[in-house]
Image: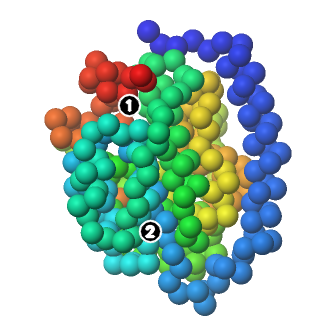
């Protein structure tokens, strides 16, 4: 049974909306004022922090995300992996990778306030470790990668050049996904598209999937919303953040090239919420809070 919103959910949503509306445009303007000089073309190899939240997916994390990130043609990176209190062999597997750029932090507790429906696990499940990764990041740029996704080898190189050349604060791009054996290039959606707004589309900045994101680190104060599951629409944590970045006035660019790949996990034949629903019993058991 789907969760039904309460009056409390609506109140929290409206208060957060007001808080974001007031605070986040100020954060963007302040970040530009303080740090804009750090993003000139004269700084040729800035440190890029790659943030990967994960939970009990050690083998696929290593085989896909870690392998892909460490194989980048752009070398000045730090790879921050944050476990959501992992209890599998994630830490053991990562300890075998002798690369000083890789850092692993395992959160001590795994606790949330949302009702444990399969939809809510999908909407907001990875937000807490992703926020911790942002806290730990020290680079001038932030890149996001899900633990079961992969990148093209020149992912960071291309996105960084595109961002610097265009003086963008946030860039994203095409990615390729696979559902039920069919691979399709996903070309992104406008921030004010019907896909997001449920109203007539309005020309605006295009936004790609989260594993194509690269953005300036002074924006990391805009955290993933742990209460996004309470909203009526756009409940997914990465969608919620990307729309807030747009509304805060962040300069966005979109690279029309495939730089990321989102494929089913082993034993599954689709991705995203569809995959969660098709393996609902197993997923609810896996993500259950103790």
The residue positioned 49% from the left and 71% from the top of the image is 48
Return the residue found at the far bottom: 42
- Say which element carries label 1: helix
Residue 210 position (above or below residue 225): below
Q: x and y percent of residue 136 in the render?
A: 54, 58
The residue positioned 74% from the left and 34% from the top of the image is 16
The residue identified by callout 2 is 78
Q: Is residue 208 left or right of residue 75?
A: right
Q: Can you see residue 259?
A: no
- Say which element carries label 2: strand
The residue positioned 23% from the left and 61% from the top of the image is 96
Q: Nearer the viewer, residue 250 or 140?
A: 140
Q: Can you see residue 130?
A: yes
Q: Is residue 274 left or right of residue 216?
A: left
Q: Nearer the viewer, residue 209 or 100?
A: 100
Q: Sequence order check: which comes first, mark 1 or mark 2? A: 2
Q: x and y percent of residue 22 in the render?
A: 83, 45
Q: x and y percent of residue 62 in the render?
A: 25, 55
User: Dot 2, how many residues are within 10 Å of its Cα: few (below 14), some (14-19), or many (20+)?
Assistant: many
Q: Is residue 83 left or right of residue 282?
A: right
Give the label on residue 242, or none: none
The residue identified by callout 1 is 273
């Amino acid at each position: 049974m789907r969760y039904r919103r309460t009056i409390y959910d609506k109140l929290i949503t409206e208060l957060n909306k007001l808080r974001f509306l007031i605070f986040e445009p100020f954060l963007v303007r302040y970040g530009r004022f303080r740090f804009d000089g750090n993003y000139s073309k004269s700084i040729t190899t800035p440190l890029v922090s790659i943030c990967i939240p994960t939970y009990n997916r050690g083998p696929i994390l290593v085989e896909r995300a870690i392998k892909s990130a460490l194989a980048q043609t752009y070398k000045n990176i730090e790879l921050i992996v944050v476990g959501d209190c992992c209890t599998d062999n994630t830490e053991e597997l990562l300890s075998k990778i002798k690369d000083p750029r890789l850092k692993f932090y395992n959160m001590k507790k795994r606790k949330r306030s949302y009702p444990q429906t399969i939809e809510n696990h999908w909407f907001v499940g990875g937000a807490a470790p992703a926020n911790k990764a942002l806290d730990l990041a020290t680079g001038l740029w932030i890149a996001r990668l899900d633990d079961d996704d992969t990148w093209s080898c020149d992912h960071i190189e291309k996105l960084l050049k595109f961002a610097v050349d265009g003086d963008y604060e946030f860039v994203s791009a095409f990615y390729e996904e696979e559902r039920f054996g069919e691979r399709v290039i996903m070309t992104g959606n406008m921030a004010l598209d019907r896909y997001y707004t449920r109203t007539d589309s309005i020309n605006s900045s295009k936004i790609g999937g989260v594993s194509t994101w690269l953005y300036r680190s002074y924006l990391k104060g805009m955290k993933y919303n742990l209460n996004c599951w309470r909203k009526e629409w756009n409940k997914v944590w990465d969608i919620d953040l990307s729309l807030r970045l747009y509304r805060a006035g962040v300069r966005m660019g979109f690279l029309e090239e495939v730089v990321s790949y989102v494929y089913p996990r082993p034993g599954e034949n689709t991705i995203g919420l569809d995959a969660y629903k098709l393996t609902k019993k197993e997923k609810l058991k896996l993500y259950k809070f103790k």
